[in-house]
Amino acid sequence: MSTTIPRPDTGTEAGSGTAPRLRRAVITGLGVVAPNGFDTAEYWDAVLHGRSGIDRVTRFDPAQYPAQLAGEVPDYDVRKYIPGRLVPQTDQSTRLSLIAMETAVGDSGLDLATVPQDHVGVATGISVGGLEYSQRELEKLWSLGSDHVSAYLSFSWFYAVNTGQISIRHGLHGPGGVLTGHTSGLEAIAQARRYVADGLPVAMCGAAESGLCPLGWAIELTTGRLSTVTDRTRAYLPFDTAASGYVLGEGGALLVVEEAAHALARGARPYGEIAGHATTFDPRPGSGREPGLRRAIELALADAGVTPADVDVVFADAAGVAELDRAEAAAITGLFGPRAVPVTAPKTMTGRLYAGSPAIDVATALLSMRHGVIPPMINVTDPVPSDQLDLVLGRPREVPVSTALVLARGEGLNSAMVLTAP
């Protein structure tokens, strides 16, 4: 049961335009699980050194499919991280979410026992649900009969399962929510910011997701956007003349968000602040109106109270699909100017992680702020000249990062988030 926290009289939600934003939301804990790093430190070292986690699929035999590469999280002993009773109940997406959140809480240094249980919110993003678990149980249904189907299927596939399992695992009774779609990792972080604006001292948020099973593969192949290149160094090349689609991956990032004064009072060291956010829809095809990504960026910058000149780096959505890359490049250069801001996409080392991608981009941007370095994108060797982007290619760029912009897109949906140094 959730308890409603009264909106404080000192301010309202950021971007509402009705009052100054006084309740600032800062990120104090990160938990990353990725194909090229099973924890935050390992992942950060990998992206700085250009180590990819993309390779031929091992979870199932991909020989019968046109796309055969993915970013798989390395094998791990699930019972080392997940209580034994949860193992038969959980899909890979939920397991990765629980592991990443446990890491984030530890990283924050927050003792949850010191915070009332109904004063901690949880918001997660997800786009496909527990596909691997669902496929396994459906196979039992058709081959063995209904008596062999696990009762846990009733919730293991469910979009809200990660929010629920995180809440149960940590004994939380505050507001909970789930956002859906490929941008939802970013939307979940924005929801945590709203929880703080509404009076909560702490919120847990983010997304970690997996759909690497034949069922997920078949669904994704219907888009026609999966790369069928079998060379792991040439399959996923956003903003490159040889772009042929994207590669899927699994994983993501979970975060601990706190009200700034709450974090300060306990001596926490925030990674950064969620300063601005906006979401827009694309117009109807054939309407003659431009896509909504630029508008999302403009609204997010306005919400944060910063200008394009203040932005030190853009973490691009980087679809790896020619028409989508051209649209994103046009939005960036149209607002910032040609080659006016560094643009990167470390997801070239992980693949696109469904809802986990924008969440892990936020985590990477925060690490960039803390360490003063922009991680590169790899394998891109022939950028499309007309894009006029200042791509960070091949090696890290050591520059101070005070303001970062993270972009995410779904089908007709655009999301932009501005992060600022604490």
Image (cartoon, rainbow, N blue to C red):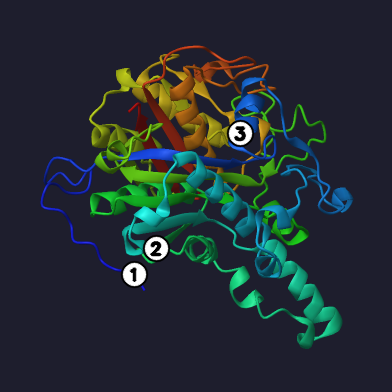
Q: What number is the disc on residue 347?
A: 3
The tag earlier along the polypeptide, 1 or 3, is 1
Q: Quadrant of the N terminus?
A: bottom left
Q: CA distance from mark 1 to mark 2?
A: 7 Å
Mark 2: amino acid:
Gly
Residue 173 position within the rendered picture, expressed as x and y whole percent measured from the top left = 38, 67
In this rendering, the answer to whether 296 lies above or below 146 is above
Front-most of residues 149 and 237: 149
User: Does residue 107 appear to the left or right of 284 in the view shown?
Assistant: right
Mark 1: amino acid:
Ser
Residue 241 position within the rendered picture, expressed as x and y whole percent measured from the top left = 65, 23
The tag earlier along the polypeptide, 1 or 2, is 1
> Helix, strand or loop at disc 3?
helix
Judge the density around disc 1: few (<14), some (14-19), many (≥20) Cα neighbours within 10 Å.
Answer: some
Residue 254 visible, this orientation:
no
Q: What number is the disc on residue 176?
A: 2
Q: What number is the disc on residue 2?
A: 1
Q: Mark 1 touching mark 2, by CB under 8 A?
A: yes
Judge the density around disc 3: few (<14), some (14-19), many (≥20) Cα neighbours within 10 Å.
Answer: many
Q: Mark 2 touching mark 3, by CB under 8 A?
A: no
Residue 54 position within the rendered picture, expressed as x and y whole percent measured from the top left = 74, 36
Give the label, 1 or 3, closer to the camera. 1
Q: Residue furthest top?
A: 398
Number of numbered markers: 3
